[in-house]
Image: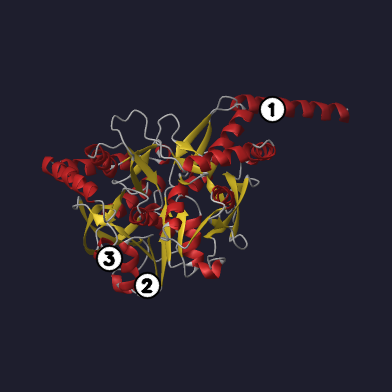
Amino acid sequence: MKKLFCLFAFLVLGVTVLTSCSKNKNKPLVVACGVSTSPYCYYTGEANAPVAGIDIDLIREIGKELGRPVQFKVVPFQYVFTLISREEADIGAAGITITPEHSEGVLISTPYDTSSQVIVAPDGSDVRDEETLKAARVAVQEGGTDIPYLRESIGPEAVLPFLTLDEVNGALSARLADAAVMDRMQAESFVKANPDKYTIPGKPLTRNQYGLIFNQKNSALMSAADKVIEQFKKSGGLQKSRSAHFDALNTIPPPRGNEDKGKPFVVCLESSFAPFVLMNRNQLMGMDIEIAAEIAHELKRPVRFKIVPFTEVLPLVESGAADMGASGISITPEREGLVLFSAPYEKTVRRILVNTDSAYTRPEELNGKVVGAKKGTKSEDFAVGELHAEKTVHFDNAMQGLLGLLDHKIDAYIDDNGEADLASEKLATLDGKRVRLLDHSIPLEEYGFAFHLSNTEAKSAADRVIETKRHRGEIRALSRKYTSIYMTLDLNDF
């Protein structure tokens, strides 16, 4: 009898599993992916395939193995974790390094790739390790983990981001840079192509492992993914994918169907700064996007958008690796010494936000406190220089900053007035959580588009487009349009 009962239980369990698999057979595998971590996950701008990268190739294999179609949702990096924790996405991907911090509250797969960053130096160079990098001008290819690692852990004299390895080679050849830092696989290929010019001195600088993330309730899916990952590596799929996407980073194909001819007009921007730039159902949009497309058309060049962290926008323009920088960039005397600005197209003030239950009523009370600000913005300077904050915590965007505020990681958060208002309203809409504004505003600032100091042609085209749109009332109309769109979005729309 006991054996019969066990057999019956086994059969029931088998039927349950088969039924579960059958139910999921045609259900889309929803993937939340950030898009500023080339070559793992990057934005292509193509309607049918908005994302590409090593992560994307791997996830397509997982979908194929499970017999499920894959649906990609392009979101800011921090929303990858949010969607996974809410069970609104099945897999999270964004070149996610396996760290204790990233593993909190989620499941993380077995590593699908391991990467190390190394130095590439001209023959005879004194640059050979972390210590000698501190006094060097270092060229890197934008989009990977090299830039934040160098700036946060090494602190060289300068970090010079370039769009392609050819441009890195040009910077080294012209002695604009003393050395380069790149992925070991890239470095070996780079040195092999230039055997009499460069070497890889010393040991690797870092060693990172990358994984996919899952909701804690979804261990079965993670186990299935782990098996595919192992097969992906053993079959040579990983090596093939890495080679393909590293090669893709070195080319700039013109967008399909664009009637303008010639070299692409590369615009670098951060993708989460409404109403200037935002994502909506995998589509990049915003007032900056529309204006940039018209500037490129004025120059009779196809436009190509590159999504990067905000801190990399101006360095890419300054180095000549991008034609234009966007995302609501404040025009300041310091920045005007580095890049050429268009005529202003928008004005703003900055505001200070605190928790609704906090006792803060005046900016002076934040003296010696912990204040958050968006990376690379003037809000950072204000936090230190005016509020005399003991510590400034850097965030990628306003929503991330407000979540840090609600979690009491910071005492206050500073941002652009429009972005602060929009993000706080959006937070209330999504989570029912609220913050409040202090009755104080930071002096008026103007926003402009950034160009290389020598690119007067593009600046003139931008000025013409801005003046025409202002005269027609289109600047205000664009701001209202994308503010309205942003306020109607929920996380499923990003």
The one nearer the camera, 410 or 261, is: 261
Residue where numbered disc 2 is placed = 389
Q: Residue at x 18, y 45 (%)?
A: 466
Residue where numbered disc 3 is placed = 334
- Total marks shown come to 3
Dot 3 or dot 2: first in sequence order is 3
Q: Residue at x 57, y 45 (%)?
A: 213
**CA distance for labels 3 and 2:** 22 Å
Q: Position of residue 311 (x, y in %)?
A: 38, 57
Dot 1 or dot 3: first in sequence order is 1
Q: Which residue is the extreme one toward the front?
A: 196
Question: Is there any visible trace of residue 317 in the rendered image?
Answer: yes
Q: Amino acid at mark 1?
A: Thr
**CA distance for labels 1 and 3:** 65 Å
The one nearer the camera, 330 or 125, is: 125
The one nearer the camera, 250 or 9, is: 250
State whether residue 390 is above or below residue 329: below
Residue where numbered disc 1 is placed = 16
**CA distance for labels 2 and 1:** 58 Å
Question: Is there any visible trace of residue 403 in the rendered image?
Answer: no
Q: Amino acid at mark 3?
A: Glu
- Label 3 crowd (10 A; few <14 / some 14-19 / many >=20): few
Q: Which residue is the extreme one toward the left?
A: 471
- Label 1 crowd (10 A; few <14 / some 14-19 / many >=20): few
Q: Position of residue 439 (x, y in %)?
A: 24, 64
